Amino acid sequence: MTRNAAVLGAGPGGLAGAIALAQAAMAVTVFERAPQLEEVGAGLQLSPNACHALEAIGARAAIEAVAIAPPQAQLRSGRDDRLIFANPLGDIAIARYGAPYLHLHRADLQHVLAQRAQAAGADLRLGVAVARVGPDGGVQLETGEALVFDLVLAADGVRSSVRQHWFDGAAPRFTGQAAWRALVPRELAQPSPAGVTVWAGPQRHLVAYDLGPNRGLNLVAVTERSAWVEPDWRQRGDPQELRAAFADFPAAARRLLEPVADCQFWGLFDHAPLPHWVRGKIALLGDSAHPMLPFLAQGAAMAIEDAAILGLCLQADPEIETALARYQRQRRPRTARVQAVSRANAKLFHAAGLRASLQHGAIALVNHMAPGLGQARLDWVYGWRPALD
């Protein structure tokens, strides 16, 4: 008898999970509250580890076809534009890790994964909201319809109602950081940075990277603030306020902000690593289990990694409860470490005064004297490949 699974959420993590579950010979239904998969959000970075996970679920080639591979990533001073650190990507990333480092629009990733999920047999139900789930596999929709599944995979994001109800009960906390996100047409963003560029300054930083000729330049700007008082965690931002926040940054950074006509603005929320991701027939995936701050560019990557490992666990073990326990055991240490490094990077990017001079100076010296050490620092992240322990 075919086992069935419900996936809550049709973001990249949920759709990758749906593909992995279908590959494990499960009948999959994806429930998504939104009535359609719209082009929300902006750019994403998919490092080589994410590409290996996409390979495991059969989606890497299709993703590479809609993405671009940047030549490098660099960290520059928000005070004087001085180069602090450079990490070569492009062909060097492929040679070192066996997979590329990619940039693409979130909507393109979501579109490809949705196509792959449906091709694998998943039933994608849009405009359907889930009211509650139970550890026995019960799913009740807001329409009143009641269903039962052998597995419920909650990929419903940092504000996951499933996590809050069945796991720790705590709402995500505001980190003291808020971000703007904008897309700028390529012809207006001149000169466009080669690869990923991060300008780091006191209590703020700016990230810029190209998404290709049809998508433009992606900008993410993060500042610190004492409280998040807006009624919604994601809302429309004020381009003038964005430019004012970075008015003393180098001219190269300010020029990229000048053409911004529309932007999103949201608070960054987080919660501590959970002791458990599994309860009965419920499993968490992606931000619902381990929200990633955007300071290591690993949010989408970790969710796709989760999906690949969950699929392998279910293929290796016919007992769902045993497979879920193995999934939690294998994924939790890595994601907790990535969460910790992402948080630490926020302090590095936003350092001020003497601390910034010492930290950035030490990184710049190592980058100049022994550039290979800088690359090796991220090998444990980028060199990951999907395999069962």
Image (cartoon, rainbow, N blue to C red):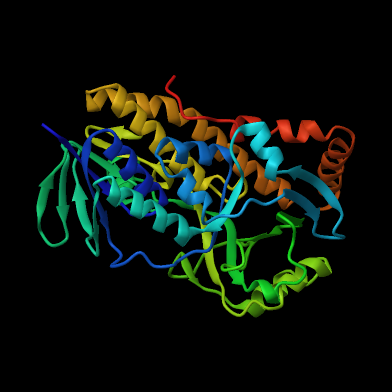
* Residue name at image x 35 percent, y 33 percent: 310
Q: Residue at x 69, y 41 (%)?
A: 91
* Total numbered circles: 0
The residue closer to the viewer here, 29 or 167, is 29
Viewed as shown, does residue 172 lie left or right of 354? left
Would you place residue 280 above or below residue 241 in this image? Answer: above
Does residue 116 appear left or right of residue 318 in this picture?
Answer: right
Closer to us: 72 or 326:
72
* Residue 372 location (% of width, % of height): 79, 32
Task: State the image coordinates of residue 82 (x, y, percent, origin top left).
Answer: 87, 54
Camera-side residue of 150 and 26? 26
Residue 279 located left or right of residue 257: left
Let me know if residue 378 appears in the view: no
Residue found 68% across the figure and 45% down from its top: 90
Where residue 18 appears, x then y in whole percent? 31, 44
Residue 279 quadrant? top left
Residue 308 seen:
yes
Relative depth, front residue between 272 and 65 = 65
Q: Specify the quadrant that holds the N terminus.
A: top left
Q: Position of residue 93 (x, y in %)?
A: 67, 39
Residue 115 located left or right of residue 74: left
